[in-house]
Structures are given as structure tokens and as C-alpha cells.
Image (tube, rainbow, N blue to C red):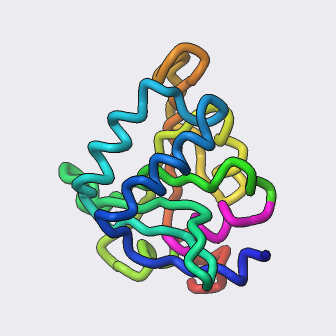
Amino acid sequence: MSAADVRLRPWRAEDRSLGVALFDSNTPGYFAAVEKSDFLDFVDDPPGPYFVLETSAGEALGCGGYARQPKAPSVAALCWGMVRGDLHGRRLGERLLTERLMRIAADPAFETVDIQTTQHSRGFFARYGFVETAHVPDGFAPGMDRVDMTLRLDAWRARQGRG
């Protein structure tokens, strides 16, 4: 399976159990177990578009979304993006990220994209132009630093040839 053989579809309430499985497959490497209740609260009432990355046969490979920052309407925040733990390294994370960035960039009201991630994923986002703006040791849980990053959409569009 390649990243080209997958699609994004809108999240549905009945996807909750697959979301739990995706979350669990990334714990403790990328998420702390104590974050699970926050994730479940989020997927029960997402504040913006949330998606499932799946094969054409409907096999869930990942999930992720974004939301407009209420106090900064020109900022989109990436929310709870993850790829099934046994599928890391197959460019599925890239597909999930670029699909979300394309949707965000299509809205001219957005100027930047923010994410709060961990030190374990910082390098992934940096490859796509995100710049670290803050680092809080143990910010999510012991051993799970919170790394705040931002991406200017004009720079991302230029890198994509979308000027």
C-alpha cells in the first residue's frame, strides 16, 4: 500500500472505536496514556473538520483534523493527527498532513497553521516548514515535551508552487 492508494473521508461518530485503536497504537511512543480522555472528548465533539485516512477498502490507517483558533481566526490548529503505529515510515503521515494543509490553504482567511506536538514528532513537522516557537519540558506528561510549532501558509503555498 502506498500513500497514493488512500483517501481522506469525514470522521463519523461511529469511528470512535477505531480512533481509540489508532491512539493506543501510538501510546506510549507518541502520546501519553493520560491524554486519551482528552482525545476522546475531542472526537466526541470536534471543533473543526476531522478525517479518517483509509484504504479504498475502508481500512482505517490514521486520523487527523484542524480547527480555527477562536481568538485568532487567521490561525488554523492541527488537531490529533496520527497514523497507525505499525504503519509509520510509509509516507501516510505525509499524506494526512498535506491533505489537511491543502484544505486549510484553500481558505484565504487562514494565514498560519499551528501545532502542539512532542519532541518525537518535531522533526517530521520541521520537514514541511513548521518552525518551533516554544518548548515546554514534560508539557504533556513526564517525558513528553510540548513543542509548539507554526507554519506560514504563504511560504507553504510557495513551496507547493501555489504561490
Examine the structure image and report whether residue 96 is included in the region drawn in magenta: yes
User: How many labels, in total?
Assistant: 0
Bounds of the magenta segment: 90-101
Residue 87 is situated, as x and y percent measured from the top left of the image, at 74, 57
Judged left or right of residue 4, residue 19 is: left
Q: Residue at x 68, y 35 (%)?
A: 120
Question: Residue most toward the top?
Answer: 142
Q: Quadrant of the N terminus?
A: bottom right
* Viewer-proximal residue among 42 and 71: 42
Q: Residue at x 68, y 48 (%)?
A: 85
* Viewer-proximal residue among 39 and 149: 39
Label the magenta part by its dominant secondary structure.
helix
Quadrant of residue 156 in the image?
bottom right
Residue 128 is situated, as x and y percent measured from the top left of the image, at 67, 60
Above or below for 136 versus 17: above
Above or below for 72 versus 12: above
Q: Residue at x 47, y 60 (%)?
A: 64
Q: Quadrant of the C terminus?
A: bottom right
Q: Residue at x 33, y 36 (%)?
A: 38
Residue 107 is situated, as x and y percent measured from the top left of the image, at 35, 79
Above or below for 35 versus 100: above
* Viewer-proximal residue among 73 and 7: 7
Judged left or right of residue 76, residue 55 is: right
